Image (tube, helix red, strand yellow):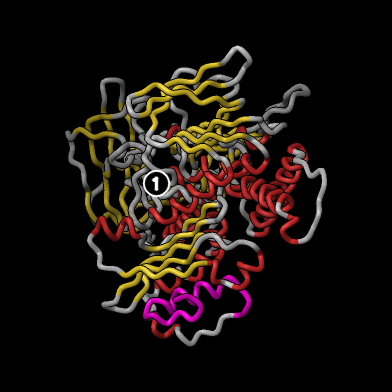
Amino acid sequence: MSKIIINKLFGEDKSARVGKIFVKTGDQIKAGDELFNAESAKGNYLVKSEHEGKILEILIKEGQQIKIGDAAIEIDGVKACIKTEKAKSAYSFGLAQPKKENICCDLVVVGGGPGGYVAAIRAAQLGADVVLIEKHKIGGTCLNYGCIPTKSLVKSAHLFDEILRSEEFGIHVQHAKIDLLKIVERKDKVVSELSSGIKYLLGKSNIRLIEGEAKTSPEGGIFVKNAKIEAQISARNIIIATGSSPAILQIPGADLPIVLTSEEILSISSVPESLAIIGGGVIGMEFAFIFNSFGSKVTVIEYMDDILFNFDEDIIEVIVQECSDRGIRLITGARVDEIDLSDDGKGIVAFTKNESRCYAIGDRVLMAVGRKANLSALDTEALGVSLNERGNGIKVDLHMRTSNPSVFAIGDVTNKLQLAHVASHQGIVAAENCMGLESSMKYDVIPSAVFVSPEIGVTGLCEREAKKSGIAYKVTKFPFSANGKALSQGETKGFVKILSSEEDHTILGAAVIGPGATDLISNFTPLIMQKTDYRTLSHTIVAHPTTAESVHEAILGIEGGAIHFA
């Protein structure tokens, strides 16, 4: 059962009056059948069906005022797709012209990031004919400007840190230095290999990839044009996966050339002597540690009272102490007011803290104040798609369906949780619902990883949330300083932390900060999701020596059974 949504009226009309209705309840209709007239001062428009099936209810009346996005008819059927012939290209007198093409498919996905390309592949696995549109680079922000390139830099930073500590391990290294051009070159190679891999998978799944900027077509559907084709795409369903872009504070000096976004800083050619970072969230802190390792004098200016303010206090304390040990300057509870240039070309960041005017200096300034959904990528109003209450993301239900039942939205554009793995799973859920399966999202047990030093991984309920919600919980910790492998590697900072319920003997949430935390946290996600009784885990045998023993010891510690920590 679905609804026929009004997505086109006369010319640029957004509203009209219902004229003659040509169908009635019980009628069988097919694509192209005339449904009703829509009348406005500018002219009349004959609304035709894009669906096929049996009419269950007429939701409009003659004389009623309607607007784009309103539901007109409830139907027991599906959106149809009318195949048309490819238009013949005209003789171009030696100049290549884009080939006009009408494409009919089951699903068109707009955006080829970790949500979009995963959705496309999953739909293809279920038998859909899929078109994927990407205007920039396949893989989206995650592959090209986020998760993957930053982790490539993190590896270089960690390796350099270890080289500088090598004498602790009996190894003498002289004249070690950073070659940022080589680091960036390696990063680009990693990105290129993964991008090629995604394109290979799309090809194996018979997904048509069109590179170009998607537009909402006046005729309905999606229009895309590049140097080779000019395509009008008609599909039963649309998945919007247009992602997000770096947010920029609207302050004087934000457009100065020394001010960089998290995307632009990935390609700089030399390590700045000093770096001022506006924003102490995940993005800002990851870059703070990277460039501190590379040799920059780093200052972080954060509006909230804590860096990484969504995390528990004991985790923040470890990172704050590490920043102090490394010489990373943290300024919290500060409002950045403007950015100016000094006489020698350095950035001067002016901020207010405790009602006093203060300044920070940086050869470069990194703007790391979050990301904003790319809502203008498509005309959501023309598609009959509503935004959320705050107007900063597309409104979706747990099936990833928008206010238009034929249109789905996934990833950062929904502004639910801006995490690549969330986008990917939302893509799977959306694709399965497009293909008639019943799938829904659950947001209560989603792991999160932060690649600072030491690493952070969290999943499930955190202590901050538990206190706020009044949920009864018990905290158990096991320190990495009591783990054999961590000690042998010289990485003893941090701990494994578990929040548990004594009432039903289940794990509510977990956090790991320390060596390999971003991998270790995955041990807890299925235990929380499946509400596993932690008492059944006491006889699990974990390989020795591994950092995973710390996870087991923390679980044993819930009932006072930890062996290597009292």
Residue 74, given in percent of the width and then of the height, sits at 27, 52
Left or right placement of residue 333 versus residue 276 in this view: left
Q: Residue at x 33, y 53 (%)?
A: 397
Q: Residue at x 82, y 43 (%)?
A: 175
Q: Amino acid at mark 1?
A: Phe
68 or 48, nearer to the observer: 68
Question: Can residue 382 be spotted in the picture?
Answer: no
**Highlighted magenta segment, given as a residue range:** 543-566
485 or 407, nearer to the observer: 485
Q: Residues within 10 Å of mark 1 (few under 14, many from 20)?
A: some
Name the quadrant containing residue 288.
top right
Q: Residue at x 45, y 51 (%)?
A: 236
Question: Can residue 32 be spotted in the picture?
Answer: yes
Left or right placement of residue 69 versus residue 514 in this view: left
Give the residue pinned by disc 1.
Answer: 309
For the C terminus, give its image quadrant.
Answer: bottom left
Question: Dot 1 lies on which element?
Answer: loop
Magenta stretch contains residue 545: yes
6 or 332, nearer to the observer: 332
Residue 375, given in percent of the width and then of the height, sits at 43, 36
Left or right placement of residue 452 versus residue 195 in this view: left
Magenta stretch contains residue 369: no
Residue 25, given in percent of the width and then of the height, sits at 22, 53
Residue 109, given in percent of the width and then of the height, sits at 52, 47
